[in-house]
Image (cartoon, grey):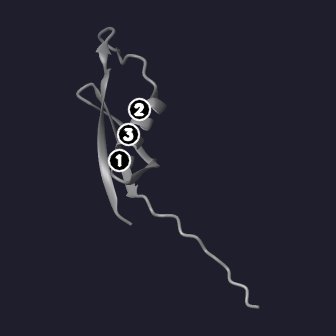
Amino acid sequence: MESKIFSYKADGVVLEPVNDQLKLSPVFDRKELVEKIKDILKADGFKLDERSLQFKIEDGQLFIQGLAGKEQEARSIGFFAGS
C-alpha cells in the first residue's frame, strides 16, 4: 500500500503568554482541523489514518502530523451458481 506522511500547520493556533508560567492558545475545533486535512489528502486519493495523528507544538505553533494511505478501490466478490 502506498503511504505518505504529513505535517499540517494549524494557522491561528499559536500559544500566547498569559503570565510568566502559562501560555494558552485560542479556542479551536480539533475535528474541523482533521476534516480539512482529510479533504486535502482525498484530493490526492489518500485517506487519513486517524490512529497515527500526533499534535505537536513547535515554537508555539500547533502542527498535526500523521500517516495517510492510498485509497483502495472496493472489490466485489461474486458467486456463480451452476445450472
Residues tagged 1 and 2 counted as in contact (Cβ below 8 A):
no
Relative to residue 81, is residue 72 drawn left or right? left
Under mark 2, the amino acid is Leu
Instruction: Check the image and report above or below for 82 versus 72.
Output: below
Q: Quadrant of residue 79?
A: bottom right
For the point 43% across and 18% down, the residue is 27
Camera-side mark, 1 or 2: 1
Q: Residue 43, labelled with which disc?
A: 1
Q: Position of residue 69 (x, y in %)?
A: 39, 57
Q: Position of residue 31 (x, y in %)?
A: 48, 32
- Residue 39 in the image: above or below residue 24: below
User: Which of the two residues, 54 or 45, is positioned nearer the viewer here?
Assistant: 45
For mark 2, what is the residue?
A: 33
Circle on res. 9: none
Q: Secondary structure at mark 2?
A: helix
Give the vertical position of 52 relative to 60 (above or below).
below
Q: Amino acid at mark 3?
A: Ile
